[in-house]
Amino acid sequence: MALWVLDDNERQLNAQKQRVEVIEKLSVLQAKLAGGLTSTISAARVLAVTFATHPGIDKEEFIRLAAEVHASNTSIRNIVLVRDTKVDYVFPLAGNEKIVGMDYRDMPAQWPVYQRMMREMAIQVAGPLTLVQGGTGLVVRIPVYRPDGPRQADGKDKSASFLGSIGMVVNYESLLSDIGLPLMQREINIAIRGRDAKGRDGDVFFGDPALFGEGAITQQIPLPGGAWEVAAQPTGGWQVTSRVSKVIEVLGFILSVVVAVLSYQWLQRNRLREENEKKLIESEALLRLRNDALSATSQGVIIATPDGRITYVNQATSYLSGLSQQYLQGMKLGELYGDRVRAFLKEDPELQKTLQHETCRETADGKVIWLELTMSLVTDQQSKVRQYVGVLREITKKKLAEQELKIAAMAFETQEGIMITDTHSTILRVNRAFTEITGYEAAEAIGKPVSILRSGRHDVAFYKEMWQSIAKNRYWSGEVWNRRKSGEVYPERLVITAVVADDGSISNYVGSFTDITEYKISEDKIHQLAFFDPLTNLPNRRLLIDRLGRALASTARHKRHGAILMIDLDNFKTLNDTKGHNVGDQLLTEIGLRLKACTRTEDTVSRTGGDEFVVVLEQLHPELNQAAAQAEGVAEKIRQILNQSFALGSVDYESSGSIGISMFCDEPIGIDELLRRADMAMYQAKALGKNGLRFFDPSMQAALESRTALESDLRQAIGAGQFVLHYQLQVSALGDPIGAEVLLRWQHPRRGLVSPMDFIPMAEETGLILPIGLWVFETACLQIKKWSAIPARAGLQLAVNVSARQFRQASFVDDIKNILARTGANPVLLKLELTESVVLEEVDTVIEKMHALKEIGVCFSLDDFGTGYSSLSYLQRLPLNQLKIDRSFVHNLPKDKSNATIVRTIINLGESLGLNVIAEGVETPEQRDFLLRSGCQAYQGYYFCKPIAINEFEELLDA
């Protein structure tokens, strides 16, 4: 009776052991899946943050960030940016072209999940589902909002402005493979339901749906926005056999074997008395006994002589061995089962004990089966070995079970910390990662309450809400602060899942967690890089825009004024160019510190780029005049501290800044407009002599609008044929025409003739000078070609001014060569006028370009010579043909003695360098005569001819 009680107890223990093993496997599956999705979602948070703070993100910026995320996580199939409900960008584009432009409202299968994401303002997982671009995948969507209002008690913004979402398609098959689900399916039967993260209410999308009704263990796998429910049981069902029952079975079988052997011996003794007829009867009886007692069993029986030769095997032995009974009889046990059995047979009988030996063989269909041979000896009264009896049984299932236990133990030891508790939160089992993360060894943790890990940072309400969620949803996931054994408090991502018994009650809890200390550090770094200037640690433009939006809302709500101070350092580029960028960076850092010292904690000091800083002042006086006075006081304080000397290493630097101020309150003015007004005021302060401050004036807006309209007209002028060239005559000392300088004019249909001073700087700034410059060269070369057919004009040389931006173009030389080839103009008759600012920047590159054009005959004149920082060493290297004396030196000749000296010096310098000299701005005969006496041989100015149109110029030549 005791054996049966023991057998029943062991059956229950085995059943409990199987349940724990299945729970461990499901915990590993849950940890890997949660970790995989968490890693994927974390990788895309940079995109979500960028979209939230920069709603106007362009395609190039999206592709750059998406490529980094895609490269760091191979399970991501593609990434999309959705504005509102419409897909705007996708990466990679190849293979996903069908997605672009699609609207989720037109997709019945995905629209409900998208609506739920918008409604709950939380990350949602959809699928597995069939994708528009083909294949099966999980769609993870991160909602993106731009907060601009108060928050609810749950932390969500009531007036949050929904921008759209960042979506990722995760490769479904790859995800299952990465978490080892196909391999685990070989060990236990698994089914998963909860499509679109609907938990037990969702469809079954993996495994046999029948598992959810067969007493299998069920467990929740938390996902963003919901969960999956998994059901599992061992392959082949729950096994309730016990070692006691197996022992009883073996003992019973051995007992029957012993009875058979004793009967056999008794028959042998009878054979001695009845040698003939009784011998036959004995043999028949023995055969009947063997067949009746042994052949019916499923276990193999082997009887062998003292030297190990087999005399009998039953049919089960033949089946298990894969050899016929006839073949086995007569073989030796050592030959059949190897050295260990051979050594056992050679031992002293007095030392011999029962031998258990495991072996395996391959079946005809390629499967491997495991066998266990139990050998015992039969002796006579003199302890002499008479026979060996072996019992052979198949133990393949046992070996596979042992192997599964090893695999389960290995899988349990993942990088995710795992602990299993009872319903009273007492720790029952932990893995190695638990010890590595918490510092508690398994022996120290098992039997202790989970509360040994509490950090004290969460209040009672936090844990109450957690357990209410577990009771309702059978799981909880989130970030918590826990305490290591050392006392160190650290952040972790924790998932708690309830294990549900067959009767629906909770039997255990499984907690899996990951130390996210490094993730938190990385998250802080990402936030710092996304919202702060790395040099000064001040808020960057992105964070400035966010804070300015909040400031606008606050001032409108409280009816108090605010101000924007736009600060630009004077002559900062000169410091960078002369002392190096390191010294410039030191200055910017020091200025950031001084600006913060001038403002209140509620104000914002930001660096928006280069040498530009922006200060936002909030909560100023309700009256505009008083508020403006407050803003002026702060601006003046800033101006004064910028005027103080800066110690930059070995350099004492005197700085200054120009400050523009724009006031705001409850006017319906956008952020961009406010910044533009402050910027305009700053540039006006700079234009008035720098080192000053200026409030925004509405007249600035009118000037800006006029400039904007002029820029729009300028962009259309080329195609509309509104540009013309005017020609100013150049003459020799004898008064003969030697050429002309071509000057660009804009004949506007409404404005009339627009001054070059109004549109040339704008063309330089906008880059329109490049196509305009090519048009000038083309027109001038066509004119040279046209004059080549007229002998009186065939030798006239045309001078064309070249802008710095135009000359720096890598294609400049090729552009000039192509125009010359296309028009057929003689290169010798084309003269390019370069200013000193052009030739003294990147001198080696300039010289290389000049030589390339001079080789084909093009001439060069150094324009406005003497007004810059001329260097004789550079003049010697430059392949020039001519120096051009600037009009400022010619203006007061010959009365101005200083100018007269400068002009003579330039003429003498030109002669010493082998260069001819031309003077511009000649307006009187006295000026011409002085230049002639000084040795200048060419002139240009109103005394000879003002700039005129081509038809008038040709009439002048013919006169």
Image (cartoon, rainbow, N blue to C red):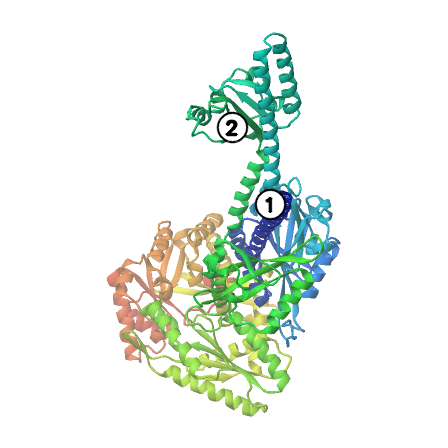
State which quarter of the image contains the N terminus.
Answer: top right
User: In this image, 238 relative to 653: left or right?
Assistant: right
Residue marked by disc 1? 181
Crowding near pointer 1: few (<14 within 10 Å), some, many (20+)?
some
Look at label 2 and name its amino acid: Met
Residue marked by disc 2? 375
User: In this image, 485 relative to 913: left or right?
Assistant: right
Q: Is residue 256 above or below residue 76?
A: above
- Check if mark 2's residue and mark 1's residue have beta carbons within 8 Å: no
Look at the numbered disc 1 and give the secondary structure of its residue: helix
The x and y percentages for residue 494 are 56, 61
User: In this image, 920 relative to 190: left or right?
Assistant: left
Look at label 1 and name its amino acid: Leu
Q: Is residue 284 visible?
A: yes
Q: Quadrant of residue 227?
A: bottom right
Q: Which of the two discs, 2 and 1, labels the residue nearer the N terminus?
A: 1
Q: Quadrant of residue 451?
A: bottom right
The x and y percentages for residue 624 are 58, 90
Out of 258 and 399, give the one closest to the viewer.
Answer: 258
Out of 932 and 823, give the one closest to the viewer.
Answer: 823
Crowding near pointer 2: few (<14 within 10 Å), some, many (20+)?
many
